[in-house]
Every structure is written in structure tokens, then in C-alpha cells.
Image (cartoon, rainbow, N blue to C red):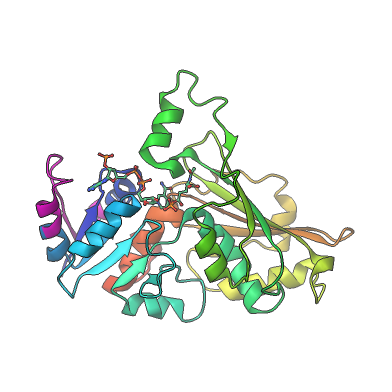
Amino acid sequence: MSHKVFIDGEAGTTGLQICERLEKRSDIELIRLSDDKRKDAGARKDALNSADAVILCLPDEAAIEAVSMVENPDVRVIDASTAFRTDPEWTYGFPEMSDDQRAAIKASKRISNPGCHATGFIALTRPLVEAGIIPSFFPITATSLTGYSGGGKSMIAEFEGAPDHGKGHERLYATGLAHKHLPEMTLYSGLESPPVFTPIVANFPQGLILQVPLHLWALPDEPDIDAVRNLLTAHYLGEPFVRVATAEESAAAVAVHGASLANTNQLLIHVFGNPDQDTANLVAVFDNLGKGASGAAVQNLNLVLGVEEGLGLI
Ligand SMILES: NC(=O)C1=CN([C@@H]2O[C@H](COP(=O)(O)OP(=O)(O)OC[C@H]3O[C@@H](n4cnc5c(N)ncnc54)[C@H](OP(=O)(O)O)[C@@H]3O)[C@@H](O)[C@H]2O)C=CC1
Ligand SMILES: CC(=O)N[C@@H](CCC(=O)OP(=O)(O)O)C(=O)O
């Protein structure tokens, strides 16, 4: 039996990548609108209500409008925008986040796909906050290096359309420390206050490194580097898409490249540390359009459709 899926916003950056992943599958029948109909409210409404599942890859306002058009109670909605990520009526689409999240996603009709930076931040911090290694009141900082596709079609055009191919366009942004992912980062990490978060956009198309530096001596239990790594390793044991590097792998990783997991749905965690200074750097590497967006959306789609989360299906 094939599942009918409609991607609203198929022509955008996230939509295109989801489409590429789903086109190859015999168990999925894509509902597609012609270019002249893809912004036509009537055509979108019909498509939204005749699918088993819809994936919204739209700006926030258009995503809110699309949700309001869904009248068929059986339709499962996965939204890639920021609009519903902290809405209590929606389920946060991060299956690896906690023991019960995968089951909650499977049972839900409204799933919000996590933001790319938020994915790395929550992956690194939530298990440690839950275990009390990082107390919920603790002040945390995070930095991120992201590929320019994170800014959608307009940022891709800025970098790729420039005569210098984006040379010199790399920059620190969200300098007002009010990035739009802060609410979801705070809520799902379990922290009481938002991190000081400073992202940098780099001159490569796809890939993301998010890092959370820690003064281990300032944490109440003064954990050592191995204790932090062991806890994260145990949390993600058996997960097909999230893995913690061994101490040996991290020791050998003298550099980490932002695009190293591009075009995959993988997220790799390194726990780097300096025992003499009692410091650690938690690092998550993944693809902003993979586990940070389109790959994650397909993973959530598989869960709501009851398809096994096999590596081949992302
Ligand atoms: N890029 C990324 O790494 C990530 C993006 N996201 C989120 O996913 C969503 C899509 O982002 P992204 O793919 O990057 O953005 P893009 O700008 O690349 O694509 C958005 C698409 O939506 C279309 N669109 C806009 N308004 C409407 C409408 N009213 N009806 C139908 N289609 C419409 C646009 O049309 P047109 O082509 O004519 O402009 C465009 O094709 C956003 O909410 C973004 O925040 C989430 C995680 C990561
Ligand atoms: C480079 C760049 O601008 N990246 C985007 C993040 C993209 C993303 O995760 O998506 P959402 O828009 O769905 O939250 C930013 O930091 O705002």
C-alpha cells in the first residue's frame, strides 16, 4: 500500500530535498502541484486534505495558513517552520530526545520539525540536564557554524550568485542574541534560561557544527570528561542517526569539518576536553538540511506512517 504525501513548499530548499528523498520510494505517492498552482489556495487546500501526511516547507505565516486549511481529521501534518515548535498542542519531532518521544511522534497528528541549530543544542544538552550533570539553572553558551543553505533560497542566491561566489560573505549573525531558535532550545533542553547563542554562516552549502563549551569544574558534581561522554553514549545507544564518538575517535579528530556529514541524516557528537584545565567542548556535527531539516522530516514521516526507520529510507 502506498502512502499519499503532499509537500507544501516543494520548490523551496527544504522541500526540494525532501522531494528528492521521497521520489525514489515505491511506498510513497507524491501529490504534486504544477508551478502555476503551487501558491493557489484552492489547489493547496485540496492537496492538503487528500494526503495521508503533509510536510510544510514554508515561511511561518504560510505554514500557519496551511494548517488552518487542513479539515480532514486523518491528515498527519509535519511542519518544518518555526511556527509551532513550542506549541503544547504539537509534538516536537526529535525522536532521540527522550525515551518516550518516538512513541509520542508516532501517535501524533501534528509534528513540528526541530530547527537546525536547536537540533544540535538539544542533542548535546538535554541528556546532561535530565541527568542533573548540568543543573537547569546553569548559564550555557553555544556557537554554531552553518552552511548558507540554512538561509533558504535567498541566502543560497546571495552566496552562489555573487561574482566572488560568496567569498567574504561569511559572518556572525543574530548579534542581538535573540535567535529564533532560543525558545525551543530552552524548552526542550530543560534549561531555565536561554543560552547565549552566536551562530556564524560559512561559505559552504550544507553542514553544521554546534558547540557547547563547559567549565567542568564549575558544575556542581565536577564530572570528568569521560563521565560526560559515557552519559551521552548511553543515551544514544542503538540510535540509527545519532552517535557519540569514542574517546579515541575524538582524540584523533584534530579538526572537525562543517560539511563532513552533508547529504546524510547523521548527527555525530564529539566530547572534546582538556583534563588539565577541567574543560570540555561538546560538539554536534550534522547537515542543516539533513538531520537539521529535510532528513529529520522524512524520519518523522516514516514514524507517523508506521514505516520502519531504516537507514535506506532517509
Ligand atoms: N533551509 C534550512 O536549512 C532550514 C529551513 N527550515 C524551515 O523550513 C521552511 C522552509 O525554508 P526553506 O526551504 O529554507 O525556504 P525557501 O525560501 O528555500 O523555500 C520556501 C518555499 O515556500 C514557498 N512559499 C512561500 N509562500 C508560499 C505560499 N503562500 N504558498 C505556497 N508556497 C509558498 C516559496 O516559494 P518561492 O519559490 O516562489 O519563493 C519557496 O519555494 C522555513 O520555515 C524555514 O524556517 C527549517 C530547518 C532548516
Ligand atoms: C544560515 C541561516 O540563516 N540559518 C537559519 C536557520 C535555519 C533553520 O533551522 O531553520 P528554521 O528557519 O526553520 O528555524 C537561521 O539561523 O535563522
Q: In the image, is residue 123 above or below residue 129?
A: above
**Magenta part of the protein: which range?**
22-45
Residue at 23% x, 52% y is 23
Specify whether 242 is left or right of 43: right
Specify whether 31 is left or right of 87: left
- Locate residue 220: give its quadrant: bottom right
Residue at the far right in the pictured view: 276
Where the C terminus falls, by quadrant? bottom left
**Residue 56 visible to the viewer:** no
Residue 290 colored magenta?
A: no
Across and down, in percent, residue 294 comes to 37, 54
Frontmost residue, 35 versus 275:
35
Residue at the far front in the pictured view: 176
Frontmost residue, 3 versus 52:
52
**Residue 134 visible to the viewer:** yes
Where the N terminus falls, by quadrant? bottom left
Q: In the image, is residue 29 above or below residue 309?
A: above
Residue 34 colored magenta?
A: yes
- Locate residue 265: give its quadrant: bottom left
Across and down, in percent, residue 2 comes to 16, 66
Residue at 25% x, 48% y is 10
Residue at 56% x, 71% y is 236
**What is the number of callouts on the image?**
0
Residue at 27% x, 50% y is 19
Frontmost residue, 264 versus 59:
59
Across and down, in percent, residue 11 comes to 26, 43
Specify whether 166 is left or right of 244: left
Across and down, in percent, residue 133 comes to 72, 75
